[in-house]
Amino acid sequence: MPKIKCCSNKKISNELKKTVDFLKIISEENRMRILCILKSGPKCVCEIWPNLDLSQNLTSHHLSVLKEFGLVKSKKQGLKVFYELNDKNLQKQLINLDLFLK
Amino acid sequence: MPKIKCCSNKKISNELKKTVDFLKIISEENRMRILCILKSGPKCVCEIWPNLDLSQNLTSHHLSVLKEFGLVKSKKQGLKVFYELNDKNLQKQLINLDLFLK
DNA sequence: ATAGTATATCAATAGACATTGATATAATAC
DNA sequence: GTATTATATCAATGTCTATTGATATACTAT
């Protein structure tokens, strides 16, 4: 009988699902670019979307997806909203990924 | 004017696209499980698909997706087809991912 | 208050791709 | 040859989600 952890062990299987959720979020070109852009520090939306070949509203949408998963944080300053990496969580997700594939 | 490498530098931008292609492939729960299953060594399809909650033909399809991207290799032995990790390429892809996000 | 700017939300559409069921191919055994 | 097993392919469907255009909200300045 098969005893493959990522399939039979419920805890590990759930961790795999969470890792897949993370991957789904970063496996989108524009979101990946956003994360790269934010590596150089916090940026407001108006600094982000002209770098992408993307409309303002779609950029905002992708940012909200990233934020909902906890990969970025945001701060409002006057009219502008500054987004920055939640690097702690990002690195944690990458480590979890490595646990499955390395 | 913005000088963000992953957006403005063509070579880096293309590498990002390839990394995203890789992520799209592993951001599917069953494919991720297949990769994990194969970590313990080569397996024929008939050993793989009963571990997944998946039909034979769909498992075969996901394996072909993984193979097309070079994440697994296959060898035919009689009736059976044995799949194994192409670990060299898999680790390379993970390193490329780290270059963008670490 | 009005105007202008920055960001977010919403409804509708489109596109990508996982899934299904049926069937095909290929190898083995009889 | 026929039957059986293992795997792959194909067409059709469904599902998820990126994208679009329009509009709303929220803040600032005049």
Image (cartoon, coloured by chain):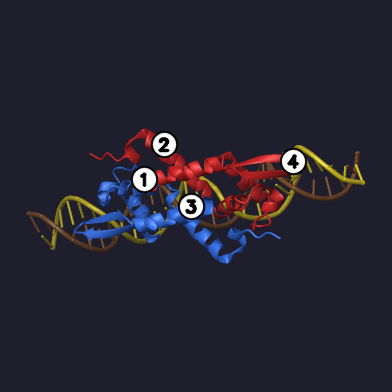
Chain colours: A blue, B red, C yellow, D brown
> How far apart are the alpha carbons under marks 2 and 1?
11 Å
Q: Nearer the viewer, mark 1 or mark 3?
A: 3
Nearer to us in this view, A6 or B66: A6
Q: Which chain is indicated by disc 1? A: A
Pinpoint residue A50: horizontal percent, then vertical percent: 28, 43
> How far apart are the alpha carbons under marks 1 and 4?
44 Å
> How far apart are the alpha carbons under marks 3 and 2?
23 Å
From where the camera sits, is residue B37 visible?
Answer: yes
> How far apart are the alpha carbons under marks 2 and 4?
38 Å
* Residue position for label 3: A98
* Residue position for label 4: B77
* Residue position for label 2: B14
**Few, some or many residues within 10 Å of mark 1 (<14, 14–19, 20+):** many
> How far apart are the alpha carbons under marks 4 and 3?
31 Å
Residue B15 tag number: none
- Asked if residue A9 is positioned above or below residue A28 in the image, the reply reads below
From where the camera sits, is residue A64 visible?
Answer: no
* SS at badge 4: strand
* Residue position for label 1: A33
Query: Residue at the location (77% across, 43% down)?
Result: B79
**Few, some or many residues within 10 Å of mark 2 (<14, 14–19, 20+):** few
- State which tag comes first along the sequence, 2 or 4: 2
Look at label 2 and name its amino acid. Asn
Look at label 4 and name its amino acid. Gln
Query: Are the residues flagged by discs 1 and 4 in contact, CB closer than 8 Å?
Result: no
